[in-house]
Amino acid sequence: MGPTKLLQFNDALNTYSSSYHGIRALFPYRSWFPLFSSPELAGLVADLIGDGHLQGRNKWRLDYTSKYATELERFNSQVRRIFGVSGHVRPCLTNTYGTKNLGINNKPLSRVLNLIGVPCGNKVFTEFFIPSWILENKPCFARFVNRLFCCEGTVDLNSKCLDLQMYKSLPLIHNGLRFFLDLQNYLLKHFNIITTSPFLESRINIRKDGFMTKAVRIKIKSRDSLSLFKEHIGIEDKRKMRRLNLILASF
């Protein structure tokens, strides 16, 4: 399946309440349109669903968070290649893990990313799905899972499995299960990778703000499926890849 046309100029223009102001804002970026699907674009969507944060109305800006400078530069370079804009790195003051934020203050870009499937706001409290243009395109889906696993996945040496988990608020557990069910179904459809059914961690997590969440999880356990994941999806994080190789060598 080839690239899919995702957006025209007018699709982005329609997100503005005033056509006059919308045209003024979007005109410098008219070369983005029509915007077509690509594996690299699918990877950016996964990055933002995983370790990113898209602020919607009225700010329309985004952050991508990592403790590794090379990872921030990778994300920045891909945004620059696709959209021709760049961000700036600043310390993350909301945690003690040594992470930094790559911030991109570009409202047209943020509107476009939201239109193609990146959720706005706190993802724990927001309903979202994997966009159909990613699910139905094998290379796009592979890249999406690759980046989502790099952000949210672990390689469990003790249990000999890949483990992917994301937290959702209790009222949105159904949405988290649906998201992971799509991962399960399309990993099988595209690559014959067998996973567990999506399941919930038994423990309820109580956040600092008092809201209760649970982790929705999925695992890949069999040697054949782990090998297929390595072959067709891959893991860019060298530390995680080394652990996966140790698991495969132990069967």
Image (cartoon, rainbow, N blue to C red):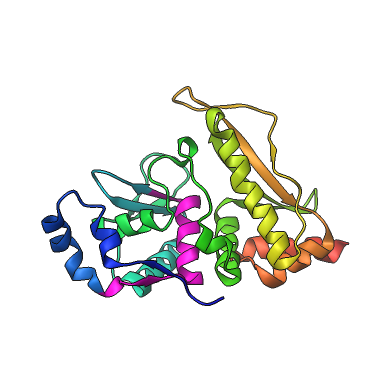
- The quarter of the picture where the N terminus appears is bottom right
x and y, in percent, of residue 134 in the image:
53, 62
Asked if the stretch drawn in magenta spans residue 142, the answer is no
Secondary structure mainly formed by the magenta segment: helix
Q: Start and end of the magenta stretch? A: 31-53
Q: Quadrant of residue 197?
A: top right
x and y, in percent, of residue 127 in the image:
48, 40
The residue lying toward the viewer, choosing from 5 and 186, is 5
Q: Quadrant of residue 251?
A: bottom right
Viewer can see residue 114: yes
Q: Residue at x 86, y 62 (%)?
A: 250
Q: Residue at x 18, y 70 (%)?
A: 28
| Total tally of numbered discs in the picture | 0
**For residue 197, above or below residue 239:** above
Asked if the stretch drawn in magenta spans residue 35, the answer is yes
Q: Residue furthest bottom?
A: 2
The residue lying toward the viewer, choosing from 76 and 109, is 109
**For residue 81, above or below residue 65:** below
Q: Quadrant of residue 6?
A: bottom left
> In the picture provided, is 9 more to the left or to the right than 244?
left
> In the picture provided, is 22 more to the left or to the right than 144?
left
> In the picture provided, is 190 more to the left or to the right than 86?
right
Q: Residue at x 62, y 26 (%)?
A: 204
The residue lying toward the viewer, choosing from 132 and 179, is 132
x and y, in percent, of residue 237 in the image:
59, 64
x and y, in percent, of residue 199 in the image:
70, 39
Viewer can see residue 88: no
